[in-house]
Amino acid sequence: MRSSLREVAARLCRHVSSSPQRPHLVVADGKRRVQFIFEKIPGGVKPDIVLSDLRLERFARNAQGQWVLSAVVHEGALEARIFLYTAGQIQSFPVWSTPHRNVDFDGDGTVGEADWAALHKNAASLYDLNGDGRITAEDETIFVLNYLLENPCHQID
Ligand SMILES: [Ca+2]
Ligand SMILES: [Ca+2]
């Protein structure tokens, strides 16, 4: 049996909530800024970074000595990522963002299980959230992330 929207959202929230990203989830509209505070970077050397689908605004230490990275997510980005090179190690951090989509398919004013079920029953273009002509796991991810924009993780078990 397919997992319910609530189950899938709760699973995704475990990853989202453990990320150093603030805010935890943003709309990828080319304007919103995300901030990462890296707590455990060894040594006093500034780490090298590589950004994928992000535009760097600032990477500097704050008053507490933590490295803080501020960046803007590219428009439409679903898999933006930060790579951090420290002490011979590469760490990679996913950036939680999504293109904004209306996923209230049945138009009842809220996003819920009925809309989630509609996504899986229909192949119409309305449900193809990334516009690639197919309904795949990526459309599911966009659906759930848009659900989480309205229903933040801290409100979900
Ligand atoms: Ca609905
Ligand atoms: Ca698709």
Image (cartoon, rainbow, N blue to C red):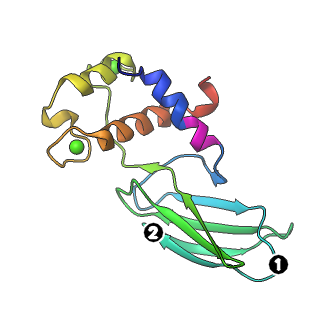
In the depicted structure, whether residue 48 falls above or below residue 100: below
Q: What residue is rendered at 79% in x and 70% in y? A: 62
Residue sitting at the far right? 64
- Image coordinates of residue 100 in percent, x first then y, are 36, 44
Question: Predominant secondary structure in magenta?
Answer: helix
Q: Quadrant of the N terminus?
A: top left
Q: Looking at the image, which is closer to me, 42 or 99?
A: 42
Label 1 to label 2: alpha-carbon separation: 25 Å
Report which quarter residue 61 is drawn in.
bottom right
Q: Amino acid at mark 1?
A: Gly
Residue 95, magenta (yes or no): no
At x 38%, y 40%, the residue is 141
- Which contiguous range is marked in magenta? 13-17
Query: The residue tagged with tag 1: helix, strand or loop?
Result: loop
**Numbered circle sitting on residue 52:** 2
Q: Amino acid at mark 2?
A: Ser
Q: In what element is the residue under mark 2?
A: strand
For label 1, the crowd category at 10 Å Cα-Cα, with few meaning under 14, some 14 to 19 and many 20 or more, is few
Q: Disc 1 designates what residue? A: 43
